[in-house]
Amino acid sequence: MDKKLTLSLDNTIIEKAKKYAKSNNVSLSKLIESYLATLTKQKRDSTKITPLVESLSGVISLDKDLDVKEAYSDYLIEKYK
């Protein structure tokens, strides 16, 4: 069952939203409804980790003082010599 909702928005935003809705062949009401549905959608269960990925976790151990950016920079310098 649909109900009416009154919103107070900046006029510039309203005009831009109307143009966007028109260019996408959708009503402004449907556009807002879709947006609100996306915002309020219940989050799905977290992605399940496959046994292969789980078996690989913890395979690599890195030094705590490793500077990842510096290591990557060194790798790129060496690669493109």
Image (cartoon, rainbow, N blue to C red):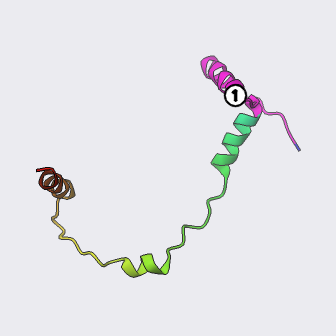
Query: Which residue is painted at 19% across and 68% down in the image?
Result: 64
- Residue 34 to residue 26: above or below: below
Q: Quadrant of residue 47?
A: bottom right
Is 73 drawn above or below residue 50 in the view shown? above
**Horizontal side of residue 1 vs 54, given as left or right:** right
| Closest to the observer, 55 or 7 | 55
Which residue position holds label 1?
Answer: 21
For numbered disc 1, what is the local secondary structure? helix
Residue drawn at 61 percent across, 59 percent down: 43
Amino acid residing under circle 1: Ala
Q: In this view, does 10 lie above or below 56?
A: above
Residue 46: percent from left, percent from top: 55, 67
Q: In which quarter of the image is the N terminus?
A: top right
Q: Which segment did they paint magenta?
A: 2-29
Q: Which residue lies furthest to the right in this view?
A: 1
- Residue 80: image location, x then y, percent: 15, 50
- Mark 1 crowdedness (10 Å alpha carbons): few <14, some 14-19, many ≥20: some
**What residue is at 48 percent from the left and 81 percent from the top?**
51
72 drawn magenta:
no
Residue drawn where x is 21% and y is 71% of the image: 62
* Above or below, 76 relative to 31: below
